[in-house]
Each structure stands twice: as C-alpha cells, then as structure tokens.
Amino acid sequence: MREILHPPDAASLLESMRSIGYTLESALADLIDNSLSAKSKNIRIEFRSSGAPYVAIVDDGIGMSADALIKAMKHGSANPLLDRDKDDMGRYGLGLKTASLSQCRRLTVISKKMGSVAGFCWDLDVVIEKGAWTLLALDLEDFSAIPHVDDLAEKESGTIVLWEHLDKLVAGEISIDVSVSQQMGYAREHLSLVFHRFLRKEDNFLPVALFMNGIKLVPIDPFISYHKSTQPLENEVFSVEGQKIFVKPFILPHFTKLSVTELRDAGGAEGIRSQQGFYIYRNRRLIIWGTWFRLARKDELSKLARVRVDIPNSLDHLWTLDVKKSAAHPPEAVRANLKRTIERIRSVSGRTITFRGRKVDKSTLVPGWTEILDRGGVRFDINREHPLITAYLQDRSKEDSAMFHMILSAIETSFPAESLYSRMASDVRTEFHSEDAEARLEKLASEMFESMPKDSSARKMLLASLHMFEPFNMHQHLTQKIVEDYSQ
C-alpha cells in the first residue's frame, strides 16, 4: 500500500468553509474569545458601512510575534485533542479564520508584541487566482492603509483583526447602512449576554471593557441576580474525569415584579418561558442556553427556573463542543446529575408562579375563588363564604339572595380557564398590579364601606381582616390606606 499526499483544493475548501454556519454575532464572539485568551482588558469593535465598509476588532492583549501570527493564520493551527491552558477560550485552531471569512472575503491581522509589528492577510480572490494556499505578508508601507493602525501604535501590545469585502454581511440588502447597523444591533445584545460575566467584576476577575463604535456594552444578566426577588438556590459540585463542574440554580422573580427593561433582559424577544433551562458556561463564556437537554419539558412550573453550569475546557471532548462554540451536549455522567437538579428546582419555580403577590400565610388567606377537584378534573368556584359576599347578602331577602347565587353560578360556568392558561403561559403582563387595578379596587372599597353604617359589626370585621381577602391582599399599601381612611 502506497501513501499519496492528497491536499484539498484551497479555493474550494475555503469557499465551502464559509458556509459552516456562523452568524455575524457568533463570528464576532469567536474573535472576542481570542482577545480574552490574549489577556485583553479593552476590546473595541469598530464598523463602517459607508465608503469601503469594514469591521475591525482592536484589543490591547499580549499580541503575537511574526512567527506566532503566521501560525495563528494557518487553518487547524491547534490540535483539539491536546491539553490547553485552563483559560484558553479556543479549541480547534479554526475560529479566527473560519469566523472571519464567513463574513468577508479579505481578512487581515496585524499584531504588535515587544515593539515589533507583523501583519498577514488571507484574500479569497488571491487564493482563487493562484489556486494555492497563498497567504499575503504585509510590508511596513502596507500598515498605513489599515484602519485604526494608529491605535495599535499607541499600545505596548495588541492586535487588529480587519474584515473587508463584506459580501456575506450585505448580500441581498438594498441599503448597506441599514443592514449593517441593524445586524450590529443584534450582535450588541448577543455579546452583552454571552460575555456578561466578563463585563462586570466577578470574584477575583476584573471587568473587561467591550465597546462597539465607542459605546460601551452593558452586561445582560439572564439570572437577574441583582434583583431582590431572585431566589438563588444552593450550589452543587460534582466531578467528571477528575474535573469539577459547578451548578448554581436560580428562580427568577415572577414577571409582574420586573420592570420593562428587566423583563426584556430576562426573556429577550422569545419570552421568559422559552429561555428556561440550563445556561452552560465554558471558562465563564456562555456557549448554550435555554434548554433542558431533553431531560425535562419546558412548561409553566419551570418557566422561572434557570441553572448556571460552569464547565472547564478540559472536558470539551465529552461535551462534543462544535467549532462555533454555540452547541454542546452533556455526557451521561453530567446528565444524571443535572436531572437531579431539575427535580429540585421545579417545585420552587412552581411555588413562585402559583403564590406570587401573597403576603400572608395561605392558611389565613380568604380566597375569592376556590379550586374544586373531582373525577371530571378541576373547576373554580366563587367562594360563597367570602366576607364581601356574606356582608352583601346579610340584609337581602331570600328571593334576592337566590337570584344573586344564580348570577354567581352563571359566572362560574363561563370561567375562561383555557384563555387564562394561554395568557399566563405567555409573558403578557397582567393587570393585577397596575395603577388601573388599584383605582378600581379603591372605588370598590368606597362603594362598599360608604353604604355600610359606621357602627356595623360587619363593617368592623371587614376592616379588621381586609388584608387577608382577595384581591386586597395583593395591594398591601393600598389596603392599609383604605383601612385607615374608613376606620375613622
């Protein structure tokens, strides 16, 4: 048997690799990984859509020598089977090239280390023309034509990655300005989420500053860990092949307790319910999120549950991490531990959804509706023992009371259970806590107490216990004011 060297056709392979599946935001994230691995503290994304459009990533990392840079420009520059530094964000030695060339036809990298500057360029049109893996080396006179090269001159070390000829980024678009600006807007949100743990101080890690056209990115915390109503649960730690995996569950506040901005950050465009699940971090970088890995279904009881899982890069081979670092699947040893986590947090998430807004113990609460279980399923009846009902019927005739109960029965039979479930399954904000709801409640109290004699025992009983009655229990401050006003 003879050995035959059979290298791939350079032009065909490079053109094919452009369709590996990178989006603009995932491509930018790959380059930021490289900057973080280079110990960068300030990373700038600069883009221009007019004239000769380009995208540039400028960092202040440790930089690369000419030999290191030419190696980095080689496809497959690192063996994914070899051990890596624990802080290394890469894996396959493909990210810089495949991510960049998925968005542009000309990739130039200039790096400065110890006062020495080197630059190399992959130009797909040159590769096609030459029919070979032709890498272009920049001469000193070529540097002046590179955008933001003056910024590099002011630094002790750093790197510029430049994308030109942005054919994929503007393909099929009528307005290049609108297209680039819109796609960069999506990328901004994506990067604010994926690198949110780098953008603020965490333990002994100092924050990294990430800018886009001079505007600093603000971290998007998917756990809303800063909110006073977020429930962090107990940490879990387990080992796989001698490597530790850290698990930290969070139960988000019910969406009625979130501001518009907090609700947007927690759910994004797809809503809170679809974003429940595990959030997998590799070296603090978010790689996959919003999935239970088929260990559980996404449903109402778990929609507020999110679980942070930290994995080391030494277990990449078990997680089948893809080239783009945007997909991973846990091995069996990890799935068994994660399944126990799901069982532990579902009940807490369910309680948060079911009992939101109640300030008193359930046993002392007088509900407006009662849940009735029978062989046919479940139904909801108006609580006939509610003090508001008993007070109203106290001086009514039998005929009026019978008519009133008939009206209540008619209302009960038309309870919109399916519509309510559909609304609560979405993230449409209810009116239970709105200013309009409080105004209606205040009007109800006014009509009720003004029609009752001040020395009435029923009035005194209602005022003494009003904070325990639905719906007054969900508006504690208003209820306290009502009691004070009508107790005088």
Image: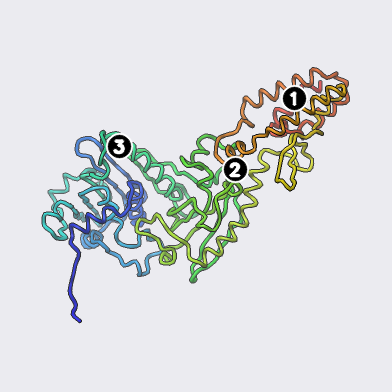
Q: Nearer the viewer, mark 3 or mark 2?
A: 3
Q: Are marks 3 and 2 in contact (CB under 8 Å)?
A: no
**Mark 3 or mark 1: whose residue is earlier in sequence:** 3
- Name the residue tied to disc 3: 179
- Residue 253's disc is 2
Image quarter (top left, top right, bottom left or bottom right) of the C terminus = top right
* Cα distance between the residues tagged 3 and 1: 55 Å
Percent position of residue 306, x then y: 54, 50
Left or right of 230 in this view: 69: left
Q: Are marks 2 and 1 in contact (CB under 8 Å)?
A: no
Identify the residue at image location x=75%, y=31%. Answer: 409
Does 80 sit above or below residue 486? below
Q: Nearer the viewer, mark 3 or mark 1?
A: 3
Percent position of residue 290, x then y: 49, 50
Left or right of 315 in this view: 337: right
Q: Quadrant of residue 33?
A: bottom left
Q: Residue furthest left?
A: 130
